Image (tube, helix red, strand yellow):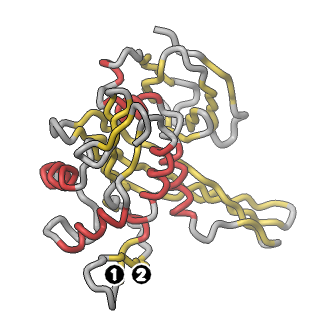
Amino acid sequence: TAFGSRAADTGGTETFGKKRKVILVPPFENLSKAKSMVIYEVATGSDPNNPKRQFRVDRYSEAPRAILEDILQSIEGVSVVERTRLDGILLESEFGRLSGLVDPEKAVKLGKMLGANAIIMGSILDVASERKTFSGYGIKTVTVTVRCSVRVRVMDIESGKLTLSKIARGSVSYASSNFGGVGDSDVAYSVIESALESLRDDAEFKIAVATGKQSGTSGLTAVEIDFTPTPENSDIEIDGIYVGGSPLKKMLPAGKPVKIRVAKSGFKAWETTITPEK
């Protein structure tokens, strides 16, 4: 092994005495009405003549894992449990069949088996769309805005305690008219991706993953911002991500500039950049 590092018993690594975070990402729980059943192949390795098994699974339980794993691998000091190892155990044991692992006790047990010291469980709470129609000058245009909410829970394997539970939100829009237009053949996947991508620059999420601590115990302060624009029921976006309608309260990291956009149909959108201070 390289100087200053050695293989850990849990399957992770330690660098200069600091234990590397090994994260387990099981299939997501899909509580929304959006479903997309696909054939999923898993290499079990148990039969050399038939090394793969096929299962029919919900794509929206399986596909978001790749997005989240990519985000996790961009965090320094973090690695992800190999998916084939996890799926093989899920399929050959009592844990479930790629349908979302939501039982905390089973999650802890599975994490220990695979040498992880943290697990991230995702639940797709809702995928909803809103249609707005405009007619004029012989043209009819339909704009569809699709929004998604995904709950992400970060659990410490050793203690079995949640270090973070938060809801990530995303939105995408597409339009069409009687003269043609642009659409998204899989807008549900795109909006799920949009919600998860909001975690990429989320300081609270990164701290919970990398340190196993909540933001309040790791030196990072947060500020509650109260969004109460006039008129009410305005759409609030933070750094290009839809976070909800007003009135709205949101915790934002202190000292980090964020772009705010407030919009409502029939009104001119308002944009600014703020730096929350404690």
The quadrant in which residue 130 appears is bottom right
Contact check, label 2 and label 1, Cβ < 8 Å: yes
Q: Which residue is mark 2?
A: 39
The amino acid on which the numbered mark 2 sits, given as a three-letter code, is: Ile
Secondary structure type for disc 2: strand
Q: Which mark, residue 40?
A: none
The amino acid on which the numbered mark 1 sits, given as a three-letter code, is: Phe
17, 192: nearer the viewer: 17
Residue 60 position in % (x across, y down)? 42, 65
Residue 206 position in % (x across, y down)? 43, 33
Q: Earlier in the sequence, mark 2 or mark 1?
A: 2
How packed mark 1 is, by other alpha carbons closer than 10 Å (few <14, some 14-19, many 20 or more), is some
Q: Residue at x 38, y 72 (%)?
A: 58
Residue 88 position in % (x across, y down)? 27, 70
Q: Residue at x 23, y 37 (%)?
A: 162
The quadrant in which residue 100 appears is bottom left
